[in-house]
Image (cartoon, rainbow, N blue to C red):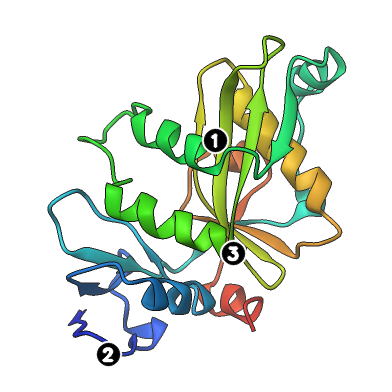
Amino acid sequence: MLFLERNQPFPPAEMADSDGILAFSMSLELPRLITAYHLGIFPWYNQGEPVIWWCPDPRMVLFPDELKISKSMKKVFRDETFTFTINKDFLGVMKNCQKIYREGQDGTWITQEIIDNYVKLHQLGLAHSVEVWNQEAELVGGLYGVKINRVFCGESMFAKESNASKAGFIWFVQKMKDHLDLIDCQVYTKHLASLGARLIPRKEFLKYLD
């Protein structure tokens, strides 16, 4: 695995190890971050570690027309349990994702460096958020990610109330289905698989970014 010097380009995706780790760097610079997403690469690391750049094979993705909505989630929408917005509180979504407890994780990977750079991506119109509000107009769920061409690269989501993040994801996929070829979910989780996401070869995924 390569340790990237300043302004050094990423190696080919095929050089990633079996876990999907492609390279390391000392910092998360905005130009490199933008380049990474165009190449199907994303950062994922813990506070105090070098930046770890990933490009796993296979890749977990959701094609919008393969979205699965359970009966219980259909009821959530019928009951109008939540309302949804896009890009109304990007920073609020990121900070909530940062705070949420995730089983098996020690601390959070959403460092202040991550927040600062993704806020800049948002200001450039590249990063977007979905907000989920309850009937008291409280932010109770959401997700954020980066849009490259017709691919939305999902980064993280949170829920303070049952089904909030799942509802936000479903709403977003349905709203954007005519504008996106796929949602990049990065790695396999049962939660995403239950919504219709599946693994595809990295080579196939990268074609969608061209």
Residue ID for mark 3: 126
Left or right of 52? Residue 192 is right
Query: Is any part of residue 13 visible from this angle?
Result: yes
Name the residue rendered at 25%, 55% in the picture: 45
Residue 130 position, x and y percent, is: 64, 40
From this view, report whether residue 118 is shown above or below residue 174.
below
- Check disc 1 and give the amino acid type: His
Most extreme residue toward the front is: 123
Q: Residues within 10 Å of mark 2 (few under 14, many from 20)?
A: few
Q: Residue at x 21, y 49 (%)?
A: 46
Task: Inspect the image, locate mark 3, and give the three-letter code of the amino acid beneath it.
Answer: Leu
Q: Which mark is residue 8?
A: 2
The secondary element bearing badge 3 is classed as loop
Q: Residue at x 12, y 52 (%)?
A: 48
Sequence order check: which comes first, mark 1 or mark 2?
2
Identified at 27% across, 33% down, the residue is 104
Residue 170 falls left or right of residue 127: right
> On screen, 132 above or below 56?
above
Gap between marks 3 and 1, in whole Å? 26 Å
Q: Observer-nearest residue: 164 or 31?
A: 31
- Is mark 3 in CB contact (under 8 Å) with mark 2? no
Q: What quarter of the picture does the N terminus occupy?
A: bottom left
Identify the mark at residue 191; answer none if there is no mark. 1
Q: Position of residue 155 (x, y in %)?
A: 48, 51
**Foreground label between 1 and 2:** 2
The 10 Å Cα crowd at callout 1, few under 14, some 14 to 19, many 20 or more, is few
Q: How many marks?
A: 3
Q: CA distance from mark 3 to mark 2?
A: 23 Å
Gap between marks 1 and 2 measured at Cα:
36 Å
